[in-house]
Amino acid sequence: MTNFNGTILENSNILSINNRGYAYGDALFETIKVSNGRILFWEDHYFRLMASMRIMRMEIPMNFTMEFLEDQMLKTLEANELQDTSARIKLLVHRNEGGLYLPNTNTISFVITAKQLENRFYSIKENAYEVDLFKDYFIAPGLLSTLKTNNKALNVIASIYAKENNLQNCLLLNTDKQVVEALNGNVFLVKGSTIKTPPILDGCLKGILRKQLMEIIKSMPEYTLEETSLSPFELQQADELFITNVIVGIQPITKYRKKVFKNDVSTLLLNVLNEKIS
């Protein structure tokens, strides 16, 4: 069951072929984790969505409050009988039909879907997780690259590349040849007591879990956080590498080329994160 503009509908026949998200990538989305009816990090998701809509010059409806959208998500969970378990919500906002590149209107519609997840809390996955650089295409630094739009051609192509090369993920570079992010999340590098993550203006997603972990790391006196550009050379010098997103939490990278990594810091951070959301 899908929530389309506040009405619960069957999943079929909701969007037309003229939908601007389909035609031009003129859409934004938030992927949100819910634990037993509790929407995790909702305030951060909401304000990121509002900021992204302003950058895209979408008209924000007067009723698009945190409370309204939270209520719509809870109704969608209930319609799918997921209110008492863990779930993945996708909240998609698209500009309404009309026009070519230049839209006829800046008004929007929204769609909310929900799928069940296995785990309420985050856990470290001990399986092998090998990555490499994807160097066929690059991310452009700047604010547009930080938005969660449905124009993900680079991620699709790089995902196929990863599968063809028996990789679990790829790290993406920007046009300055700096490491920006992974296919499905932000990247962190640990070297000694220093933890680094690329800055937003390098073109990385303004990740919700990235923000949470940065706050956690800043509160830990034994570590120093640096929001700084990462060169590919630094990857093989690191003690740990890990990827973050709100669904998986923290995914340690076990291997990059010939370098094998441990996961001590990522495990520590995950435990602190679970305490925060419990």
Image (cartoon, grey):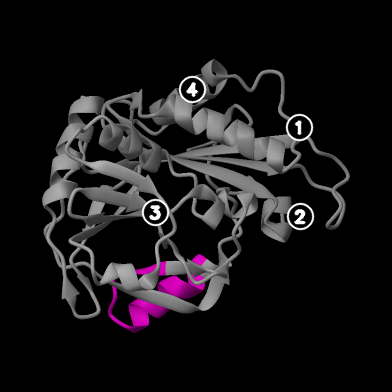
Decide which of tag 3 and tag 4 comes sooner along the chain.
4
Part of the protein shown in magenta: 155-171
- Residue 131 location, x and y as percent? 29, 71
Q: Which residue is mark 1?
A: 59
**Residue 17 or 13: which is nearer the viewer?**
17
Q: Which residue is mark 4?
A: 70
Decide which of tag 3 and tag 1 comes sooner along the chain.
1
Q: Is residue 154 above or below residue 110?
A: below
Decide which of tag 2 and tag 4 comes sooner along the chain.
2
Q: Which residue is mark 2?
A: 18
Which element is circle 4 on?
Answer: helix
Residue farthest toward the bottom in the current orientation of the protein: 165
Which residue corresponds to the image point at 36% horizontal and 47% vertical from the top-left?
226
**Residue 62 or 44: which is nearer the viewer?**
44
**Residue type at mark 4?**
Glu
- Whether residue 230 sits left or right of residue 111 in the image: it is left
Which element is circle 1 on?
Answer: loop
Q: Which residue is mark 3?
A: 185
Question: Which quarter of the rendering shows the C terminus?
Answer: top left
> How many angstroms separate mark 1 from mark 2 (CA)?
19 Å
**Residue type at mark 3?**
Gly
**Residue 230 inside the magenta-drawn segment:** no
> How many angstroms separate mark 3 from mark 2 (CA)?
30 Å
